[in-house]
Image (cartoon, grey):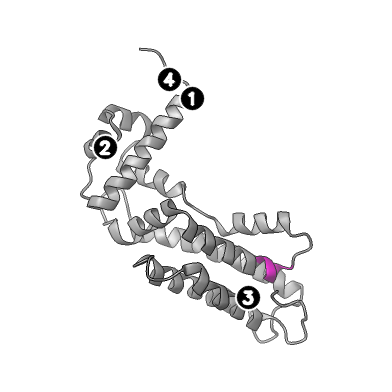
C-alpha cells in the first residue's frame, strides 16, 4: 500500500478529530469508543491508533485545535496596535477572545464538551484540563498587570494579584454562564461593557489613557 503524503495524513487526522467531536458531543466522552469514532469518520480503528495513542490523546488534540492562549491574543493586539499600554492590550485581548468564542462554532462545541460532556476516566481528567487552561490565562494576565504597575497605570490601591483575580473571575463567570446555553445571549455583547468597565476601574485616577 502506498505511503500517504503528509497532506493526506494531516487530512485523515483532522477527519478523525471532527468525528470525535461529533461523537463526544452526542454521547459524552466516556461513552464514546474509538470504534465509534472510526466508523463515524469512515475509517478503521487502525487509522485512529496510527494518529493517536488513546482516547485521551485524541481528546487533547481536539481541545488544542481551539485553544486560545491569552498571551497569543495579547501578542496579536500588540502586533497591530503600536505603543499600546499593557492595560489596553489586556482589554482588547479579552474582547477578541470573547468574539472568537462566539464566532467559531467549533470553539463553542469543544468547550461545551469539556465542561458538560467529559466525565472522569482513566486517561482524561477534565477538571485538571480546565485548571490548566485557567492557570495559563491567569499567569499571562498577572505578567501583564505587573507591567501595568511598572507603567504606573494601575490604581494605587490595587495589586496585580487582586487585579488578576478580578479579571479571571469575571471572565470565568461570564464564560460558564454562557456555555450552558450559548443561544441565550451573546457573550461578546454582554462581555464588552463588563470588560470595559472593569479595566476602567483599574486605571489610576490621574491616568488619562483609559479605555477607548
Residue position marked by numbered label 4 in the rendering: 4
Q: Note whether 153 is above or below 66 in the view shown.
A: below
Sequence-wise, which precedes: disc 1 or disc 3? 1
Tell which residue pokes out farthest to the top in this image.
1
Instruction: Write the residue at 22% across / 36% down.
Output: 35
The residue where tag 3 is placed is 160
Q: Is residue 120 above or below residue 65?
A: below
Instruction: Answer left or right for 31 relative to 107.
Output: left
Q: Residue 157: give x, y in percent of width and height.
A: 66, 87
Location of the N terminus (image quadrant): top left
CB-based contact (under 8 Å), mark 1 and mark 4:
yes
Q: Is residue 205 magenta?
A: no
Mark 3 vs mark 2: in front:
2
Identify which residue is drawn at 53% across, 62% down. Answer: 99
- Specify few, some or many for label 2: CA neighbours under 10 Å numbering under 14, 14-19, or 20 or more: some
Asked whether, in this view, residue 159 is left or right of residue 83, the answer is left
| Residue pointed to by mark 1 | 6
Can residue 29 be seen by looking at this rendering? no
- Magenta residues? 85-89
Q: Label 3: few (<14), some or many (≥20) within 10 Å?
A: many
Circle 4 packing at 10 Å, graded few (<14), some (14-19), many (20+), is few
Q: Earlier in the sequence, mark 2 or mark 4?
A: 4
Mark identifier at residue 40: 2
Q: Quadrant of residue 34?
A: top left
Task: Identify whether 56 is placed above or below 77.
Answer: above
Q: Nearer the viewer, mark 2 or mark 4?
A: 2
Q: Are marks 3 and 2 in contact (CB under 8 Å)?
A: no
CA distance separating discs 1 and 3: 46 Å
The picture places residue 8, in percent across and down from the top left corner, at 44, 25
Amino acid at each position: 500500500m502506498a505511503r500517504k503524503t503528509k497532506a493526506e495524513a494531516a487530512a485523515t487526522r483532522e477527519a478523525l478529530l471532527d468525528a470525535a467531536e461529533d461523537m463526544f458531543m452526542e454521547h459524552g466522552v466516556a461513552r464514546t469508543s474509538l470504534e465509534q469514532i472510526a466508523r463515524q469518520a469512515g475509517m478503521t480503528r487502525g487509522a485512529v491508533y496510527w494518529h493517536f495513542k488513546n482516547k485521551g490523546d485524541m481528546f487533547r488534540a481536539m481541545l488544542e485545535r481551539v485553544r486560545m492562549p491569552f498571551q497569543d491574543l495579547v501578542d496579536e493586539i500588540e502586533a497591530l496596535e503600536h505603543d499600546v499600554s499593557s492595560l489596553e492590550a489586556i482589554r482588547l485581548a479579552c474582547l477578541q477572545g470573547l468574539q472568537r468564542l462566539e464566532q467559531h462554532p467549533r470553539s463553542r462545541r469543544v468547550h461545551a464538551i469539556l465542561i458538560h460532556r467529559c466525565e472522569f476516566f482513566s486517561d482524561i481528567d477534565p477538571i485538571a484540563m480546565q485548571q490548566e487552561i485557567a492557570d495559563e490565562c491567569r499567569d499571562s494576565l498577572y505578567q501583564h498587570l505587573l507591567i501595568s504597575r511598572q507603567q504606573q497605570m494601575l490604581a494605587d490601591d490595587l495589586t496585580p494579584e487582586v487585579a488578576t483575580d478580578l479579571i479571571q473571575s469575571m471572565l470565568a463567570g461570564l464564560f460558564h454562564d454562557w456555555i450552558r446555553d450559548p443561544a441565550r445571549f451573546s457573550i461578546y455583547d454582554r462581555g464588552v461593557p463588563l470588560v470595559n468597565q472593569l479595566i476602567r476601574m483599574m486605571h489610576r485616577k490621574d491616568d488619562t489613557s483609559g479605555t477607548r
